[in-house]
Image: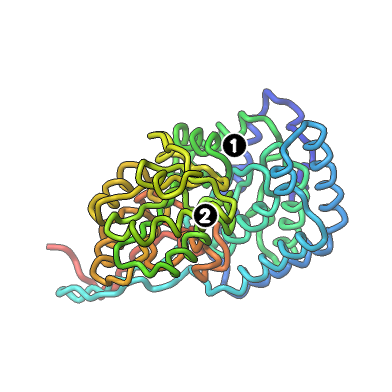
Amino acid sequence: MPALNLKSDFADADDLGTQMAAIGRRARTAARQMALASAQTKDVGLRAIADRIRASRAEILRENARDVAAARTAGQTSALIDRLTLDEARLAGIADAVEKIGALADPVGRQLAAFERPNGLLIERIAVPLGVIGVIFESRPNVTADAGALCLKAGNAAILRAGSDSHRSAMAIAKAMSEGLAEAGLPADAIQIVPTRDRAAVGAMLSGLDGCIDVIVPRGGRGLVERVQAEAKVPVFAHLDGICHVYVAAAADLAMARDVLINSKLRRTGICGAAETLLVDRACAGTHLAPLVTALLEAGCAVRGDGAVQAADPRVTQATEQDWRTEHLDAIISARVVDGLDEAITHIEANGSHHTDAIITEDAAEAARFLAEVDSAIVTHNASTQFADGGEFGFGAEIGIATGRMHARGPVGVEQLTTFKYRVHGNGQTRP
């Protein structure tokens, strides 16, 4: 197996293009081998990776400590440092997550459809790997293992590019992963990490590395995702914002609405599935609005509302037009009263990000309309928006949430990291 380059940067910055092209070629070769690997071989490989991560814990934690020290010296926020920091428990969790991904059903080779044509041709639609997946992420070193393991489970190769904050940690984790693959007889190059902090490497990946990258997945803040979506020459699985709504309809049970709303907004405020806007039907505002607003305020959430919401509680501040389009990622929610389902859907379409939106109602017909007409990757009825997560969907893990309309939408797990091909079986048919 080729030695993993643990340098912080390529020896010669002018040679970056050549180095990146070589990474791409090695990944393409490895992807062909991974596509042919049996389910059992891939599972053995993932267990070997988990074991190597555990065995390498001293090295990984040492490199992580260097990343954390550098982040503190640079004056990074406490939130970023918390995302960056690994300890024994977190590292054990990373290894356990890799094993759980290995225990998932193999997504490759599934028969998605089968049919017979009048001329006797038998046609199957079969799930196959995507190929080479480029993952560009920022401060969470666990993404190295999570994303890499998901790609491998689906028979792909992965090229990982960590942010400068997590660079050393990610390099150490990727080294353990490559060693685990080699131990299992799989290509070590199926996991490669870009061994440079040079931002030009991101541009090289977005170009597709001469056709060697099939899909790009960005995991990070708005700036990263905007750049990827603007510059990528290959398909992208991503979401730009998580502007999620909770619509409390006229037939909502108040207690349920309160519980779902508080969970949607405040369980974790900094995730993409956190609710950012509350919409309340005017038909139930007299009984529901004030208790919901009070519950939010008393739970420590600032409320920015329209006139009707401000009238419900003097602690509510006035919402601006920008608030309806803002992903607060904090204990802040925008709220307004709407005239029924049509206006709620219109508001979501005009201001939402097609991520996750919820309706709270006991009216089955109204719920059915909401689920059918709201054009988001995930729509929920009487359930928290914070279920927007691959683990909660039973996918084991996710490589991210996608809000585009092509191929993968919502949590991107192992099944979404496959595409398909058709197998056509004949007995000598020719086309007239």
SS label for mark 1: helix
Residue 105 pos. (x, y %): 53, 74
Amino acid type at mark 1: Ala
417 or 373, which is in the foreground?
Answer: 373
The answer to whether residue 172 is left or right of residue 366 is right
Residue 286 pos. (x, y %): 33, 58
Q: Is residue 167 above or below residue 107?
A: above
- Which label's residue is closer to the chain start, 2 or 1? 1
Residue found at x 50% / y 55%: 294
Residue found at x 51% / y 36%: 206
397 or 126, which is in the foreground?
Answer: 397
Residue at far top of view: 14
389 or 298, which is in the foreground?
Answer: 298
Crowding at mark 2 (Cα within 10 Å: few <14, some 14-19, many 20+): many
Amino acid type at mark 2: Leu
Using the image, tell me which numbered label, if any, was put on residue 296.
2
Query: Circle 1 sits on which residue?
Result: 21
For the C terminus, which image quadrant? bottom left
Spatial CA distance of label 2 from label 1 is: 52 Å
The answer to whether residue 286 is left or right of residue 52 is left
Q: Answer yes or no: is residue 109 visible.
A: yes
Q: Answer yes or no: is residue 417 visible.
A: no
Residue 397 pos. (x, y %): 57, 63
Picture quadrant of residue 266: bottom right
SS label for mark 2: helix
